[in-house]
Amino acid sequence: MMTFKAFDLERLLSDWEQTVDFNFAESGVHPVPLKELLNFADADLDEFLDIPLNYPEVNGDLKLRERIQALYNDAGSDNVIVTVGASEANYILANTLLEPGDEVAVMRPTYMQLSGAASNLGAKVSTFSLDENTGWALDLEELREAVTPNTKVIAAVNPNNPTGKILSEKEMDALIDTAEKVNAWLIVDEVYSGAEREKTEPTSSFYGKYNKMIAVNGLSKAYGLPGLRIGWIVAPINLIKELWKRHEYTTVSSSMLGNKLGEMALRPDVRRQLLGRTRKLVVQGFDVLQKILNEYPDVYSVVPPGASALSFVRYNLPINSTKLIHKLREEKNILIVPGDCFNFDHHLRISSALPKEYLHEGLSRMNDVIGKLLSQ
């Protein structure tokens, strides 16, 4: 049997997220109830009762794809394919673009799905860093070293998971210039655009800035609609046609109701309300987290995230991050993602775009354990 690399982060969630009292391991904002989405759209549930539970268009309902295309410069509906979350998007991209032995350069720390899929396909994965010591700035020297004339794909996440870093225009240009020099595909996962903490406009997309640019996004993270399982890829039409072939082998299509509700979510006025809700949760959640971390200033440090529901918190204790999160789970029934899931020990990825009371009670339990460790 072929050795297959597990996705450690998702396995952690699969094993434990449904069993704990407090889950700070999820990466999106607090989910939107269906009733709230319908209220934002001034819609009635009755309008959905006559929808046939058939397959939608395999590449995504046209009205949904038109809503998506409107978010990007120089994109048409044929530049869009709708997937079952951004997860399927990343998976079919890897399976379409890569063969054994191909070279891939991946940002670190990052959500490890695309790099894991590339490894499982037999690709050679190199990395370039965001530097914590400079506020998670892109390390341009590492980028130059990671990319060779044989690099086929460069992959980034912007805004970043787990750090919340938003790339500057200079950093975006550096990634594009590097890809252009070697004629590599540039894949950017943009699922946290719209979850900004300090500005009101969504982070600008890379799409349209380079002819081999691929943008991945979805409704799970910044929109708070993970249960719809709607993601998408925006890419050149010739690549979309190739992705479509793999899409038919993996999921055939996303769901009819997901397409209909997704189109509703991306109507301009509804989208504005959803992202307004998101930013409120992101801002107030980080404030609560910061107060909890300030109780132990010699233990915790964090670069404030520019966007996302996440903070990548460094801790100064002689305990491995995986051991620490299981200690928290076993003793206090809370779940946090260890830095080990990103190859960054002595860090914790903490989700905080959640209701205040839930955050405060759960994170106070975390500090109870930290206090005991310090007293030993």
Image: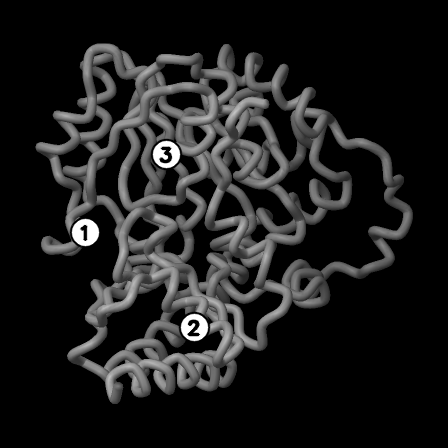
Secondary structure under the numbered disc 2 in the rendered image: helix
The relative height of residue 209 versus residue 149 in the rendered view (above or below) is below
Q: How is this picture coloured?
A: one colour
Q: Which residue is mark 2?
A: 327
Query: Which residue has dot 3 on it?
Result: 188
Residue type indicated by callout 3: Val
Rendered location of residue 225, percent (x, y): 60, 55
Number of residues whose C-alpha sits closer than 10 Å to that of mark 1, classed few (under 14), some (14–19) or many (20 or more): many
Residue 78 marker: none
Label 2, label 1: how far apart the Cα atoms are: 28 Å
Q: Which mark is residue 136?
A: 1
Determine which quarter of the picture holds residue 328. bottom left
Q: Is residue 36 left or right of residue 88?
A: right
Q: Earlier in the sequence, mark 2 or mark 1?
A: 1
Q: Callout 3: helix, strand or loop?
A: strand
Tell me which amino acid carries mark 2. Lys
Specify the quadrant that holds the N terminus: top right
Above or below: residue 294 compared with residue 45: below
* Residue drawn at 66 percent across, 26 percent down: 250
Q: How far across and down, in percent of the image, does residue 233 sit?
A: 51, 30
Q: Could you tell me how many numbered marks the image carries?
A: 3
- The residue positioned 56% from the left and 48% from the top of the image is 219
Q: Earlier in the sequence, mark 1 or mark 3?
A: 1
- Earlier-in-chain disc, 2 versus 3: 3
